[in-house]
Amino acid sequence: MEFRLLGTVSVDTFTGPLPLGPAKRRSLLAALLLSANTPVSIARLTDSLWDDTPPLHARSVIQGHVSRLRALLVGADAEAYGVELVTLGDAYVLRLPETLLDAQRFEELLTLARGQRSPADAVLMFKEALSLWQGPALSGAFAGRPLQAAAHSLEESRLATVEQMARAYAALGEHNRAAAVLRAEAVAHPMRESLAAALMTALYRAGRQSEALDWFHRTRRLLADELGIDPGHELADAYALILRGDPGPDAGRESGRNAPDGQGTAARGPARPSGGHDASGNAAARADLPTGTATAEPPGPPGDRGDAPGPAPHRPLPVPSLAGEPHPTDLLPRAPRGFQGRSAELAALTRAAAGEAPVCLVTGPAGVGKTALALQWAHRNAAAFPDGRLFADLRGFSDTGEPALIEVLREFLLALGVAPRRVPESAAAAAALFRSLTDRRRLLVVLDNARHSATVRPLLPGGTDCVTLVTSRHRLEGLIASDAARPVPLDVLEPPDGTALLAGVLGEDRVLAEPVAARRLAELCGGLPLALRVTAARLAGRPNWTLAGLADELADERSRLTYLDVDDTGVSAALRLTVQQLPRDAVHQLARLGHHPGSHFDPYTAAALAGTDPVVATAALERLAAAHLVTEAAPGRWVLHDLVRLYARGLEPEGGPEALTGVLDHYIATALAAADTAEPGGEPCFVLPEDYHRPVAVRDFVDRATAMHWLAAERDDLALAADAARTAGLHDRAWRIILLQWPQVVWRVRDNWSPLLELALDSARAQDDAYAESRVLNLLGWVLTEEGRAAEAIALLERSPALARQAGDRLGEATALINLAVVQAEQGELDTALEDCGRAVGLAREEQDAHTEMLALQHLARMQLTANRPHEALASVRTALDLGPEHEEIARRVLLLTTSGEARLSLGEENEGILLLDRAAGEAERAGYDEGAVRALQALLRVTAEPEYRKRYEEAVRRLTDDG
């Protein structure tokens, strides 16, 4: 999936562009994309969609366009790409990975191109950036003032890119190519003087002086005729350059390619001795510079370059040889002992180290083994760096603080043979000298524990054959953007590698004697190498301890972190150093995540835990993810390592109850929204708790599919939340969270819901809440019935009507009677079942609740058909269908149509019956209601041997089996 602004506003998918419809909808999409991942208010959208006074119903129009756009994205499976259109109060935000937006990729490529040392590489990146353009920006959208301004800004960026690419071509001496790319744009933008000046210069340097002068006079006349002005200084300077015959600032360097001994080359860098290097190939520095001054361009006025004679050449000072030394500089610490596994990561590091001046970035959480991996790779590949290996601990996550940049550079320069008195005093000058010394070297630079990209950049060597290896707990995305750093993310060890690490310290015999306990230790340490090494250290010093004994100790979460600390080393210490670098809001968010009862969280869940809103929570999660304290397992879905969770829980232990209540109420609010969307018109199953706190924001479900998907995806975490609520004595939350999953229970009734509903029943009884107990018994009894456990179901359901009456819950009583009647009918007590179901219809009708009445009539019709009363069954079906809109209650509608079809068959009306059953099966298949499809198709196969029905029946059964 790709979003396009650079051309016609569109959304491209594998099956083609989405049908966005009218210009106003494209304008709305454009406005959201221009502020991607940022809320856009209704007021801003109104300004983008109407130039003059907006209509009175502008808000409704916008809401309609948002609804249609959201449906298009959902239909294109946008969620799989991390794309989501969300409502936040009075604003909308289009969340998407920025790599899916062509304008963002364009800007990223420009950043990379501008950072290239090689003009040839810059040209390639500029070309790739410009290839993203497929016409004028924001085409097809309504040209409101805000979008006009945005389109103009994007076009200005494109033209500036063309000019920059032309300059890169000029640096390569390819002036004809520069002229070619500039001419097309100069024709399209004849009033843009910078384009005309650049084109004139390119034509002149390509030897096409007459064309250059002609372009000047054409532009001059146009400016005079159209605007009544004279050429500006940029155009006039280009004209004067041509008239003087000035070769320009680049010509000397270009002609110098063919000049003997480099004669004619303009001075554009540090002065070098004849030939630029000494006999051993080393770069030279200037002798007359005072101590602490970096080599730089020769001083003097502009006339010192080009044709004017320059100052007398400086006497060079040879720099000590590196490559010729028998023992190259080596500042690496020793190789890590007991290193295990990581073959894939070592191979990835080797691939990342290929190419020109690569910067390899090893990232991961505290204690995952980043330094060990870097050192292991460095020692294995020592032969690839004959000029030496440098190492610096940047202490980005240390109590002692980061070293001054000049200190690190001084150590590097001294290691490279620079005399102490010649090390510059300023960091900028020292960095320049370091780049100069490493210009023609094959050197490895390892920068460990970097905290910021800005700390790393001055320490990057200057040679194209040098490799820089950076480790960090942060993602350092700035370094990726500015220096094309190649990330090598590091995750925890798999259990086999974890046990191998233990064996490397303890010896294979001790691990082989208790293989199960060794694997359990690896799992309790979460695969974190630091935790495994601390565990191994404890066992190594205590030969009488068993692995199983220590595993039992670690199994207690309350003391696990204590056992994973030894002396000044351990998981807690490592995490503390990471956390202390975070801003206060991120630390608060992390602390509250430690109290989350579930296994994963989204911004809404995180906000509920921390007592903030999803926008603030998302920003905090991004900071935590950048520090590798949380991991984004899928777009908008984060997880927490077990040991990080335990550490986080200890940051604000007093905040645990508030965090738990907040997340439980969040689950109640979200499940209510999901149930209302999945089954609109359904009767609410309870009132909210008295001390309920509504979250700041609740997820918006656009349709039934998204609501059901959320209920399915969150099922395990909802169960964990309910269990945590019961443990904390919050029984009023526990049974509500479980009961609100009823749409999913109905949809997948045979999916082992009984244990969860029994937990809800315990909580209802713990509260002595007759209303809650009746409601839970209703759902649990029905589930047991569907599972074939009729005797247990009747025992529960017989108590439910009386409890509902006691609570004054007449609709609950009706539901209880329906479920009881279903079991009675299956047990052969048809008359009793018909009577109870009839009572349920009456109760629902008295309460004027169409939903419950429709449910009662559905089951009554089925029982009447079983009792061989097809006319009565048809009447009940007709009454039920008249109660609700056709697009709602898909499952119930399918079952009613199926009953109606079977009743027609019983009356001998075969054609009508087959048509109704086929219709029921089709609606069930389209809705994904496989249980209903199986029922309808089973009835069809009893009266026809049509192969198509057989095939559809088998497919529905297979889907049902696969899902269940």
Image (tube, rainbow, N blue to C red):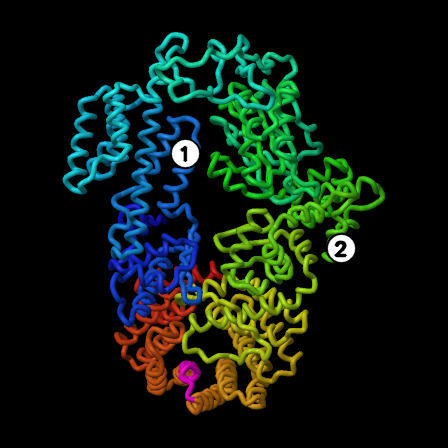
Q: Name the amino acid type tagged 2.
A: Ser
Quarter of the image where one finds residue 639: bottom right
Badge 2: few (under 14), some or many (20 or more) residues near its Cα, within 10 Å? few
Which secondary structure, mark 1? helix
Task: Examine the image and state in which quarter residue 841 appears.
Answer: bottom left
Residue 10 visible in image: yes
The correct choice, above or below, for 671 with respect to 416 in the image is below
* Residue topped by disc 2: 559
In the rendered image of this protein, does residue 744 appear above or below residue 825?
Answer: above
> Which quadrant of the view contains residue 527?
top right
Residue nearer the viewer, 147 or 104: 147
Task: Give the distance between the C-alpha atoms of the residues marked 2 and 1, in whole angstroms.
Answer: 52 Å
Circle nearer the N terminus (2, 1): 1
Residue furthest toward the right?
544
User: How far from the left and from the top, in percent, is residue 872?
Assistant: 35, 87
The stretch of residues the image draws in magenta is 848-859
Res. 829 visible in picture: no
Give the residue type that dot 1 points to.
Answer: Arg
Asked if residue 768 lies left or right of residue 633, the reply is right
Left or right for 440, reference 841: right
- At horizontal 57% and vertical 43% (from top left) the residue drawn is 474
Image location of residue 942, percent across then percent down: 35, 71
Magenta stretch: includes residue 615:
no
Q: Secondary structure at mark 2?
A: loop
Q: For the residues carrying marks 2 and 1, which lies nearer the camera in this image?
A: 1
The disc at residue 114 is: 1
Q: Principal SS element in the magenta part?
A: helix
Q: Relative to residue 792, is residue 408 depicted above or below?
A: above
Residue 852 is one of the magenta-drawn residues:
yes
